């Protein structure tokens, strides 16, 4: 089939069209294509180019569509191809066109997966399905629905949108339901029955219009189009709502996202002309056809292609045909390459005009996203209730301001079942078991249980910490349970009476802040406790102004004190070792040397050491140690200041005996069993006062016994922590603690739900959900950060060795390196003592080394300076005689040193005219002293 308007001397450009010609959809679009071609050249008779259409039938088959494209490229050598109809047919055609460089222009293949092929010759003159997901998400969020079920088909059309939809609905749970395109009616019903048993009642359906409306008809037959359900249709279905004369009466209450087509005089005129032309071409289809947006996109696609062809040079319309090789004799192997394709594609990308469907502008070879309409099917009418644009988001169709249909809208949304009530989006499954649950009506501590009753509908709702734990546990059960709450208001808060109502069968369960006791367990079974167990005492706090006598020891831990002391001793020893031979300050009797070493080391703590350090190695050690001492002293000062100045609180009362002995009044919660415990401890009836809320407890504790209040409050730990969540800076929980079982849920004896709910509570306590619930009702995170435990000991703030081990490591390494260098240097200088070949044991050699170490190092510059000073004295003018030189005998083991000293003395006499006298000092040392001649 060929259609063309070729007039000489115009140039004819062949364009292929691949459609399912036997379908109503393709007939509608083909009429638009032919009319577009006629209208364009009627308006532009002087154009030098004319499009010649070569139409092929894809027979609703993927293979046939590819064969048709192959025929158009190989035999007709078309310059472009319009089509195909579906995304499934398009994939192979796009790959083929990419190889032959023939642009494929589609107006109905909308799957986002086609973009992943990344072919530069694929042009989408329609909107990608992913463009609508933001509009769908805006509708879902505007009504506050937290969970949706996406129903789609298992092909490119259905799968392509799922990833984008999940990303758009980040804060909404997206469940998936996949239905095969080949599914029978029974298979469709089976999937729908499965969805009906779920809690979610919001369904987003995305599939081909024919199959989609077939699924919805089955949903209607099983009661899924009634009140409480929500059906949200994608634009693929809403754009084809009236296709084939389909009635809207069976789709009441549906919502949908539909492409917005701006109204214009040209569009209305075209609609009338199209209707006449379509009936002329298809006289048997009188009322089955309706112009849709895809037909408008087909019209605009031909217009855009005709404009692009006119802008290009048509001299290279041919193909570059490659000869087939011996290994590639198939039709695809011999496929030619269009020489005209690249220039046509470039021209087509720059085309912009106002078409029948709106602005035609390609962005990355795809039609630029436009706005969407939000429709509501009422009767046989599609009512527009809002619009969505990429710039402004969701807007009310009337005011253009609000993004919430539930507050202000042009017309009320009529939901399935002709309901005006906005569905909450979820329901308990139809096969769920309903149970009667009793809840206490409390006057205080409402963060545990708060019950409200609607005076009009008499519907009871309950909320609070206990309710959230109970409902979270029910959700973890393998079967569905529907709780129906029944309030019970007792004047004396007698929970025993409420427990008895479970025992006599009035209720199926009792949920609230009920304590597990032995007496109550005789009548009902309790689940595992969901709170901390025990009864404790809450007392006011006061500032502890009396500081501990030994508080100055608190800033450091014991290991840090011991390590610091050991290092003071170590540094003193290392400095003495390095200075002993060269520094007179570190010489003298043993007790003097020990005292000097300790004095020098410990005096560095306040930087008061007066001894000079002359050895470079010792100076290196002292510098490192002074830095360590500086850090230690500054840290100690800062921490001690904190201990002495920061306010530290302590409880006003610490024992029950003190309260009883002093006649103090104590409080308990009204109706609680704690009163019996207090009487058993020895409190008189006159000392007991009840409170009903955290506020009352705070008032009584603030007043104290002297003003008619109380000195302490006794209650279960859960209640006391609820009080602390409000007044954490004023009170503290102290010992004693009396054991109780905590709070639990009550079920009838031998109820199978007791074990199941207990296991569910155990799972909750081991997960993160329990923490979130506690923080919701008791602000646990704020309590932990703003109100530290007043019972925290001072030791928790102490500085430990772990804070400074790096500093000690540095000091230790510095000392060890200095020690190694000194020992190495000393042994090298006295190597003759160790290596002497004369007879002598190793012990005798070591003893000689120790004696040498104990001597002054005369070669040291410190002693040389002293000698030079004495030589320059004015009283040394006499010429000494050799007789004035007195040599003190040396031990036999020091023969070498004695010869050296004698030579050194003779040198001084000849050169400096000094009298050298060996003397014995008071310490038994052998010294050579230089002095003036007398």
Image (tube, rainbow, N blue to C red):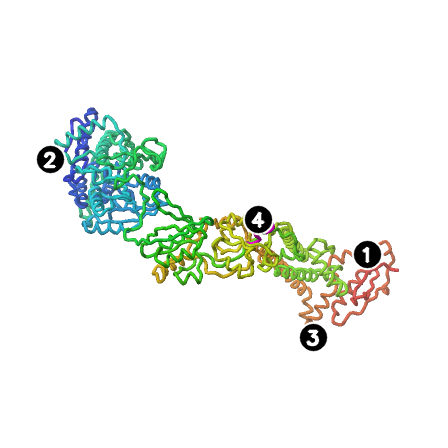
Q: Classify 10 Å Cα crowding around label 3: few (below 14), some (14-19), many (20 and above).
A: few
Q: Is residue 362 visible?
A: no
Name the residue beneath numbered marker 1. 870
Q: Is 526 placed left or right of 81 in the picture?
A: right
Residue 270 position in % (x across, y down): 20, 28
Q: Which residues are magenta?
A: 703-712
Residue at mark 4: 702
Q: Secondary structure at mark 4?
A: helix
Q: Nearer the viewer, residue 253 or 491?
A: 491
**Which residue in the structure is indicated by mark 2?**
284
Mark 2 or mark 4, whichever is nearer to me: 4
Q: Residue at x 67, y 70 (%)?
A: 834
Taking the spot 20% from the left edge, 42% from the top edge, the residue there is 210
Provide residue 300's location: percent of width, then percent of height.
23, 32
- Of circles 4 and 1, the one toward us is 4
Query: Is 571 above or below relative to 446?
Result: below
Q: Nearer the viewer, mark 1 or mark 2?
A: 2
Answer whether labels 2 and 4 touch (C-beta < 8 Å): no
Compared across the picture, whether 727 is left or right of 880 comes to left
Estimate the spatial distance between the alpha carbons at disc 3 and disc 4, rounded to whole Å. Answer: 90 Å
| First in residue order: circle 3 vs circle 2 | 2
Q: Secondary structure at mark 3?
A: loop
Quarter of the rendering occupied by the N terminus: top left
- Left or right of 547 in this view: 373: left
Disc number for residue 840 = 3
């Amino acid at each position: 089939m060929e259609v063309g308007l070729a007039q000489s001397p115009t140039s004819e450009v062949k364009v292929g069209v691949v459609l399912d010609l036997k379908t109503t959809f393709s007939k509608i679009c083909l009429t638009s294509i032919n009319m577009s071609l006629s209208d364009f050249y009627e308006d532009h008779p002087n154009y030098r180019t004319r499009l010649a259409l070569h139409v092929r039938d894809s027979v609703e088959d993927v293979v046939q569509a590819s064969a048709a494209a192959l025929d158009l490229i190989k035999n007709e050598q078309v310059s472009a191809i319009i089509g195909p109809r579906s995304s499934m047919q398009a994939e192979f055609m796009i790959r083929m066109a990419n190889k032959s460089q023939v642009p494929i222009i589609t107006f109905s293949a909308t799957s986002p997966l086609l973009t992943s092929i990344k072919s530069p010759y694929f042009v989408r003159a329609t909107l990608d399905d992913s463009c609508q997901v933001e509009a769908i998400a805006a509708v879902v969020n505007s009504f506050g629905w937290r969970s949706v079920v996406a129903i789609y088909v298992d092909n490119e059309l259905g799968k392509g949108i799922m990833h984008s939809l999940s990303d758009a609905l980040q804060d909404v749970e997206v469940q998936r339901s996949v239905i095969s395109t080949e599914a029978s009616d029974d298979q469709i019903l089976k999937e729908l029955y499965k969805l009906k048993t779920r809690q979610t009642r919001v369904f987003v359906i995305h599939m081909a219009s024919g199959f989609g409306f077939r699924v919805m008809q089955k949903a209607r037959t099983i009661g899924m189009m009634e009140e409480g359900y929500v059906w949200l249709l994608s634009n693929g279905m809403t754009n084809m709502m009236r296709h084939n004369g389909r009635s809207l009466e069976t789709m009441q209450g549906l919502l949908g996202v539909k492409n917005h087509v701006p109204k214009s005089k040209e569009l209305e005129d075209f609609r009338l002309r199209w209707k006449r032309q379509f009936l002329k071409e298809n006289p048997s289809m009188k009322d089955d056809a309706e112009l849709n947006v895809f037909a408008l996109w087909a019209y605009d696609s031909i217009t855009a292609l005709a404009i692009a062809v006119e802008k290009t040079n048509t001299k290279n319309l041919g193909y570059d045909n490659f000869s087939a090789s011996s290994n590639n004799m198939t039709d695809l192997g011999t496929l030619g390459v269009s020489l005209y394709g690249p220039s046509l594609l470039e021209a087509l990308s720059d085309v912009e005009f106002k078409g029948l469907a709106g602005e035609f502008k390609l962005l990355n070879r795809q039609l630029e996203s436009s706005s969407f309409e939000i429709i509501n099917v009422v009767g046989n009418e599609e009512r527009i209730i809002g619009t969505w644009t990429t710039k402004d988001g969701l807007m009310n169709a009337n005011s253009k301001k609000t993004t919430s249909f539930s507050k202000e809208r042009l017309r009320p949304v009529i939901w399935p079942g002709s309901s005006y009530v906005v569905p909450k989006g979820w329901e308990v499954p139809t096969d769920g078991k309903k149970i009667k649950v009793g809840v206490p009506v409390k006057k205080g501590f409402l963060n545990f249980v708060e019950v409200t009753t609607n005076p009009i509908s008499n519907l009871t709702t309950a909320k609070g910490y206990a309710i959230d734990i109970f409902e979270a546990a029910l959700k973890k059960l393998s079967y569905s349970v529907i709780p129906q709450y029944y309030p019970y208001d007792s004047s004396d808060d007698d929970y025993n009476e409420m427990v008895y109502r479970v025992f006599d069968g009035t209720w199926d369960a009792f949920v609230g802040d009920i304590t597990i006791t032995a007496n109550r367990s005789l009548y009902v079974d309790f689940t595992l406790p969901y709170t901390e167990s025990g009864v404790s005492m809450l007392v006011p706090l006061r500032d502890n102004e009396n500081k501990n006598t030994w508080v100055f020891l608190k800033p450091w831990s014991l290991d840090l004190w011991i390590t610091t002391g050991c290092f003071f001793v170590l540094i003193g020893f290392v400095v003495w070792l390095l200075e002993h031979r060269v520094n007179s300050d570190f010489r003298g009797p043993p007790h003097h040397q020990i005292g000097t070493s300790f004095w020098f080391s410990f005096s560095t703590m306040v930087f008061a050491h007066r001894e000079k350090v002359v050895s470079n190695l010792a100076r290196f050690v002292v510098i490192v140690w002074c830095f360590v001492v500086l850090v230690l002293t500054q840290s100690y000062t800062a921490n001690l200041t904190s201990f002495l100045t920061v306010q530290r609180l302590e409880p006003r009362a610490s024992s029950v005996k003190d309260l009883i002995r002093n006649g103090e009044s104590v409080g308990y919660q009204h109706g609680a069993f704690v009163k019996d415990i207090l009487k058993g401890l020895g409190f008189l009836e006159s000392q007991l006062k009840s409170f009903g809320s955290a506020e009352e407890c705070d008032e009584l504790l603030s007043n104290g016994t002297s003003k008619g209040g109380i000195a302490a409050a006794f209650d279960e730990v859960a209640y006391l922590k609820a009080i602390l969540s409000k007044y954490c800076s004023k009170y503290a929980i102290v010992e004693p603690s009396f054991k109780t079982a905590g709070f639990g849920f009550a079920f009838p004896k031998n109820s199978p739900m007791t074990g199941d709910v207990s296991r569910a509570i155990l799972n909750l306590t081991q997960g993160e959900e329990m923490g979130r619930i506690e923080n919701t009702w008791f602000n646990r995170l704020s309590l932990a950060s703003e109100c530290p435990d007043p019972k925290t000991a001072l030791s928790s703030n102490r500085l430990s060795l772990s804070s400074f081990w790096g500093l000690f490591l540095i000091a230790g390494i510095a000392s060890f390196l200095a020690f190694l260098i000194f020992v190495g240097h000393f042994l090298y200088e006295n190597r003759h003592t160790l290596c002497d070949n004369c007879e002598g044991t190793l012990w005798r050699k070591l003893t000689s080394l120790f004696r040498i170490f104990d001597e002054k190092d005369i070669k040291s510059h410190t002693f040389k300076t002293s000698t030079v000073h004495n030589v320059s004295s004015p009283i040394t003018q006499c010429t000494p005689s050799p007789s004035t030189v007195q040599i003190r005998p040396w031990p036999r083991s020091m023969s070498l040193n004695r010869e050296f000293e004698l030579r050194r003395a003779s040198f001084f006499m000849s050169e400096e005219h000094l009298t050298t006298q060996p003397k014995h000092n008071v310490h038994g040392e052998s010294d050579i002293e230089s002095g003036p001649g007398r």
